[in-house]
Image: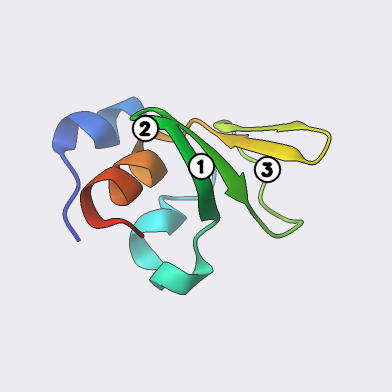
Amino acid sequence: MEILEETIQKTIKCEKNFYCLSCKPEELCKVIINLNPQLSIVQCGEDVPCLFFESYGKTKICKCPIRNELYNRYKV
């Protein structure tokens, strides 16, 4: 899957070494609701927190430009 260079540049501080680009689609946090192109509610494992992840009780928000582009372009 290809990601726009512009999106990669927005994610340059990724602490997970761009794991979303190298893992299998089933290993990604599952998008439950895509609120807009830059914001999704996700279901993730316990060891996920990163710069782009926020947890509000049981609601987990993903603001990762790469993860959201993967969902918006490829529905994974």
Category of crowding for the residue at label 1, using alpha-carbon neighbours closer than 10 angstroms: few (below 14), some (14–19), many (at least 20): few
Residue at image position (20%, 61%) is 1
* Labels 2 and 3: the sequence-earlier one: 2
Q: Amino acid at mark 2?
A: Ile
Query: In this view, which residue lies farthest toward the right?
Result: 57
* Labels 2 and 1: the sequence-earlier one: 2
Q: Is residue 56 above or below residue 60?
A: above
Dot 3: what SS? loop
**Left or right: where 19 falls relative to 55:** left
Dot 1: what SS? strand
Q: Is residue 49 above or below residue 76?
A: above
The residue under label 2 is 12
For marks 2 and 3, give the CA distance. 16 Å
Category of crowding for the residue at label 3, using alpha-carbon neighbours closer than 10 angstroms: few (below 14), some (14–19), many (at least 20): some
* Labels 1 and 3: the sequence-earlier one: 1
Q: Position of residue 69 (x, y in %)?
A: 29, 42
**Left or right: where 61 falls relative to 9:** right
Is mark 2 in CB contact (under 8 Å) with mark 1? no
The residue under label 1 is 33
Q: Amino acid at mark 1?
A: Ile
**Left or right: where 76 falls relative to 31:** left
The residue under label 3 is 49
Q: Position of residue 9 (x, y in %)?
A: 27, 29
Q: Report which quarter residue 65 is drawn in.
A: top left
Dot 2: what SS? loop
Q: Quadrant of the C terminus?
A: bottom left
Marking on residue 18: none
For marks 1 and 3, give the CA distance. 18 Å
